[in-house]
Amino acid sequence: MGSAVTAVQVIGNHETYKQALFTIDGEQFPAPLCSLAIAKKTGGKALFIVPESIATVFAQTPEECMRMLQNTDLIEEKIRNKLRAGDVEFEIQIFPSTGTWQGKTVTAEFKGGFENIEAAFFLLFIDLIKQGRQIYFDVSSGLNVYPAAGIRALYNAATHQILTNFDQHIKKTKTAPQHHLVFYPQVNKENQEIKPTIQPVEAKILKDFPLPREEIEKISRTLYNYINRHSNQAQSIVMEGFRAFNCLTLNTPLPLFFNDIIRFIEETEISQIENELQTAVSRAATEPESPPEGDSIVRVMRKPLKDFRYLRNVLGALALTKALMRLIKEFRNTVTETGVSLAKLEEFFLQNIYRDGGVDGWFTLNKELLTNEIKTIQQKAQGLPRNQPQMLTTISGLGGSGDHRRNFFAHSGFLADITQVTKDDNDNLHLKYSFRTSSVRCETIRKWISLMP
């Protein structure tokens, strides 16, 4: 546990929570909620998620309930004034509700869905992670849709964090995210001793891009209702990320070094789309279609956010693309007029990304194949004159490829028909693509690494 901890907990009527003695790592902390004890233990802060349906408990009339729902500061004020938090720093966020809720004198109906609540949690968690916070999500209270949505959102947010840091994750320079789930049994009496269970959230990513090509091609149409004219830009960005990711997983590193094949995109451009989409998703998930209304029953209308799973994956794809662009920028800083230094390519891939089989053993076979291809080029180029570029077909004594696509992937992207080799004055080899003598073009390679037929 560290000082950057945020202990998140869903709460209802705060006046019903009994004071307990929470024992954490042998220390006792008196508090009505475990999140306060964790915040006290770590020097962090607590964040309470309060469903807006709590207005039915606080309000005496439908009119008062509608005022609270229109101005949620009134709900927060009631909780903040009576919550026994001691000297622990805490915040309150009001979340959308779903279903029908009945207080002593007021009934309210909330239209929306599980997806709206899950989206609110997911956006909250990725924002906390962006701030560098370590999340402890307590699922002991509010035992209904909220902990269920929150658990799924936290696992997806942890996965999103890995995608965001993929350039470090793939080189094993950054550890997996450390977030936790917390649970404790019901407190039955004042000052009862409670030992909460704290379990780590274990997340990893699969060897797949967050979206397949067929779903990437739907981004422009689907996102138009959220970010309008920037939806085409979002699709274009994600498609470049898809190509770059495929170059890593399909063991064709050379295209990553050349802008004519994979367009470099600045982080600021991707961040702008990310922020705009997150704002739009938050608005769609939480904002009512109209002010609360009703006489005997208060009604709050929201559309279920049926697109959320897809939107979450688009955000993941944008985060991964941004990380891949950081890798590409690092690669391209070494490119000269004669192309990519073969020694640098070995350093980037064999000694870093593919080292020891790569992350989770993804690249064990890639490393063997790439090592073999590099050794073959080095052997064939031993008699190559200095500063006289020649095609790989020439120095290999081979004819042209019969099946360009197959040989491109079979030889780690070093298709002999288009791979030019140059030896410098220090006998270092440099590689680049040259399309003068082949029917293959940059656009051809772009299609291949886009997995297009």
Image (spheres, helix red, strand yellow):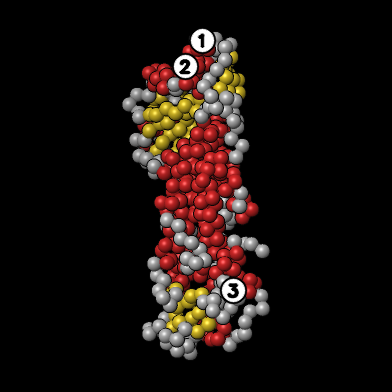
Q: Is residue 271 above or below residue 12?
A: below
Q: Is residue 77 visible?
A: yes
Q: How many marks?
A: 3
Residue highlighted by disc 1 = 61
Q: Is residue 18 visible?
A: no
Mark 2 residue crowding within 10 angstroms, few (<14) / some (14–19) / many (20+): some
Residue highlighted by disc 3 = 440
Circle 2: residue type:
Arg
**Helix, strand or loop at disc 1?**
loop
Residue 427 is drawn in which quadrant? Answer: bottom left
* Marks 2 and 1, the one that precedes in the sequence: 1
* Marks 3 and 1, the one that precedes in the sequence: 1
Mark 2–mark 1 distance (CA, rounded to whole Å): 10 Å
Which residue shows up at 48% across the image and 61% down it?
Answer: 263
Residue highlighted by disc 2 = 67
Q: Is residue 121 above or below residue 55?
A: below
Mark 1 residue crowding within 10 angstroms, few (<14) / some (14–19) / many (20+): some
